Amino acid sequence: MELIIKSALRGAVKIDDATELLTLRQICLIYGVSYDGVRQRMHRYSETPNTAINYFVQKQGGGDA
C-alpha cells in the first residue's frame, strides 16, 4: 500500500510500523477510511490494523488501483 502525502511525495508505508508514530485514528484519517469501521473489523474478525485498513481502501477503490 502506498501513502500519498499532500505535498505529492510518495512512499511506501507499512501500517503496523506506522502505529508506533501515529495513532490508529490518525492513520485512518490519512487514508480516508472509517476509524470505527476499522476497529469493528479488528475486533469482529481479529484482523491486524493493516488488514482492516486495506479492506476499506480496496473497497473505496484506493490503494494501487
Image (spheres, rainbow, N blue to C red):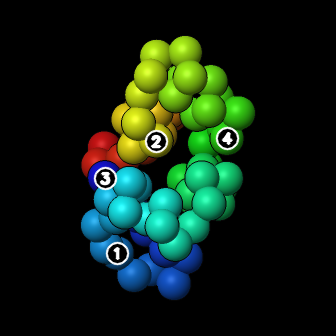
Tell which circle, 2 or 3, labels the residue nearer the N-terminal end: 3
The disc labelled 3 sits on which kind of residue? Answer: Met
Q: Measure the alpha-carbon separation of dots 2 and 3.
A: 13 Å
Q: Residues within 10 Å of mark 4 (few under 14, many from 20)?
A: some
Query: Which residue is tagged 3?
Result: 1
Could you tell me if the residues under marks 1 and 2 are in contact, i.e. CB atoms within 8 Å?
A: no
Three-letter residue code for mark 2: Pro
Relative image position of residue 14 (x, y in whole percent): 32, 59
Horizontal side of 60 relative to 64 (left or right) equals right
Measured from the top left, where is residue 41 in percent x and y? 54, 23
Q: Is residue 55 visible to the viewer in this orientation of the structure?
A: no
- Identify the secondary structure beneath mark 4: helix
Q: Is residue 48 left or right of residue 6?
A: left
Amino acid, disc 1: Arg
In primary-sequence order, the first of circles 1 and 4 is 1
Task: Tally the marks.
Answer: 4
Q: Tell me the distance, in whole angstroms, between the alpha carbons under discs 1 and 4.
A: 23 Å
Q: Is residue 53 visible?
A: yes
**First-in-chain label (1 vs 2):** 1
Q: Are marks 4 and 3 in contact (CB under 8 Å)?
A: no
Mark closer to the chain start, 1 or 3: 3
Q: Residue at x 60, y 52 (%)?
A: 24
Name the residue tied to disc 1: 10
- The image's mark for residue 49 is 2
Residue that mark 4 sits on = 35
In this view, the mark in front (2 or 3):
2
Image quadrant containing the C terminus:
top left
Q: Amino acid at mark 4?
A: Tyr
Label 1 with label 4: CB-CB less than 8 Å = no
Left or right of residue 47: residue 29:
right
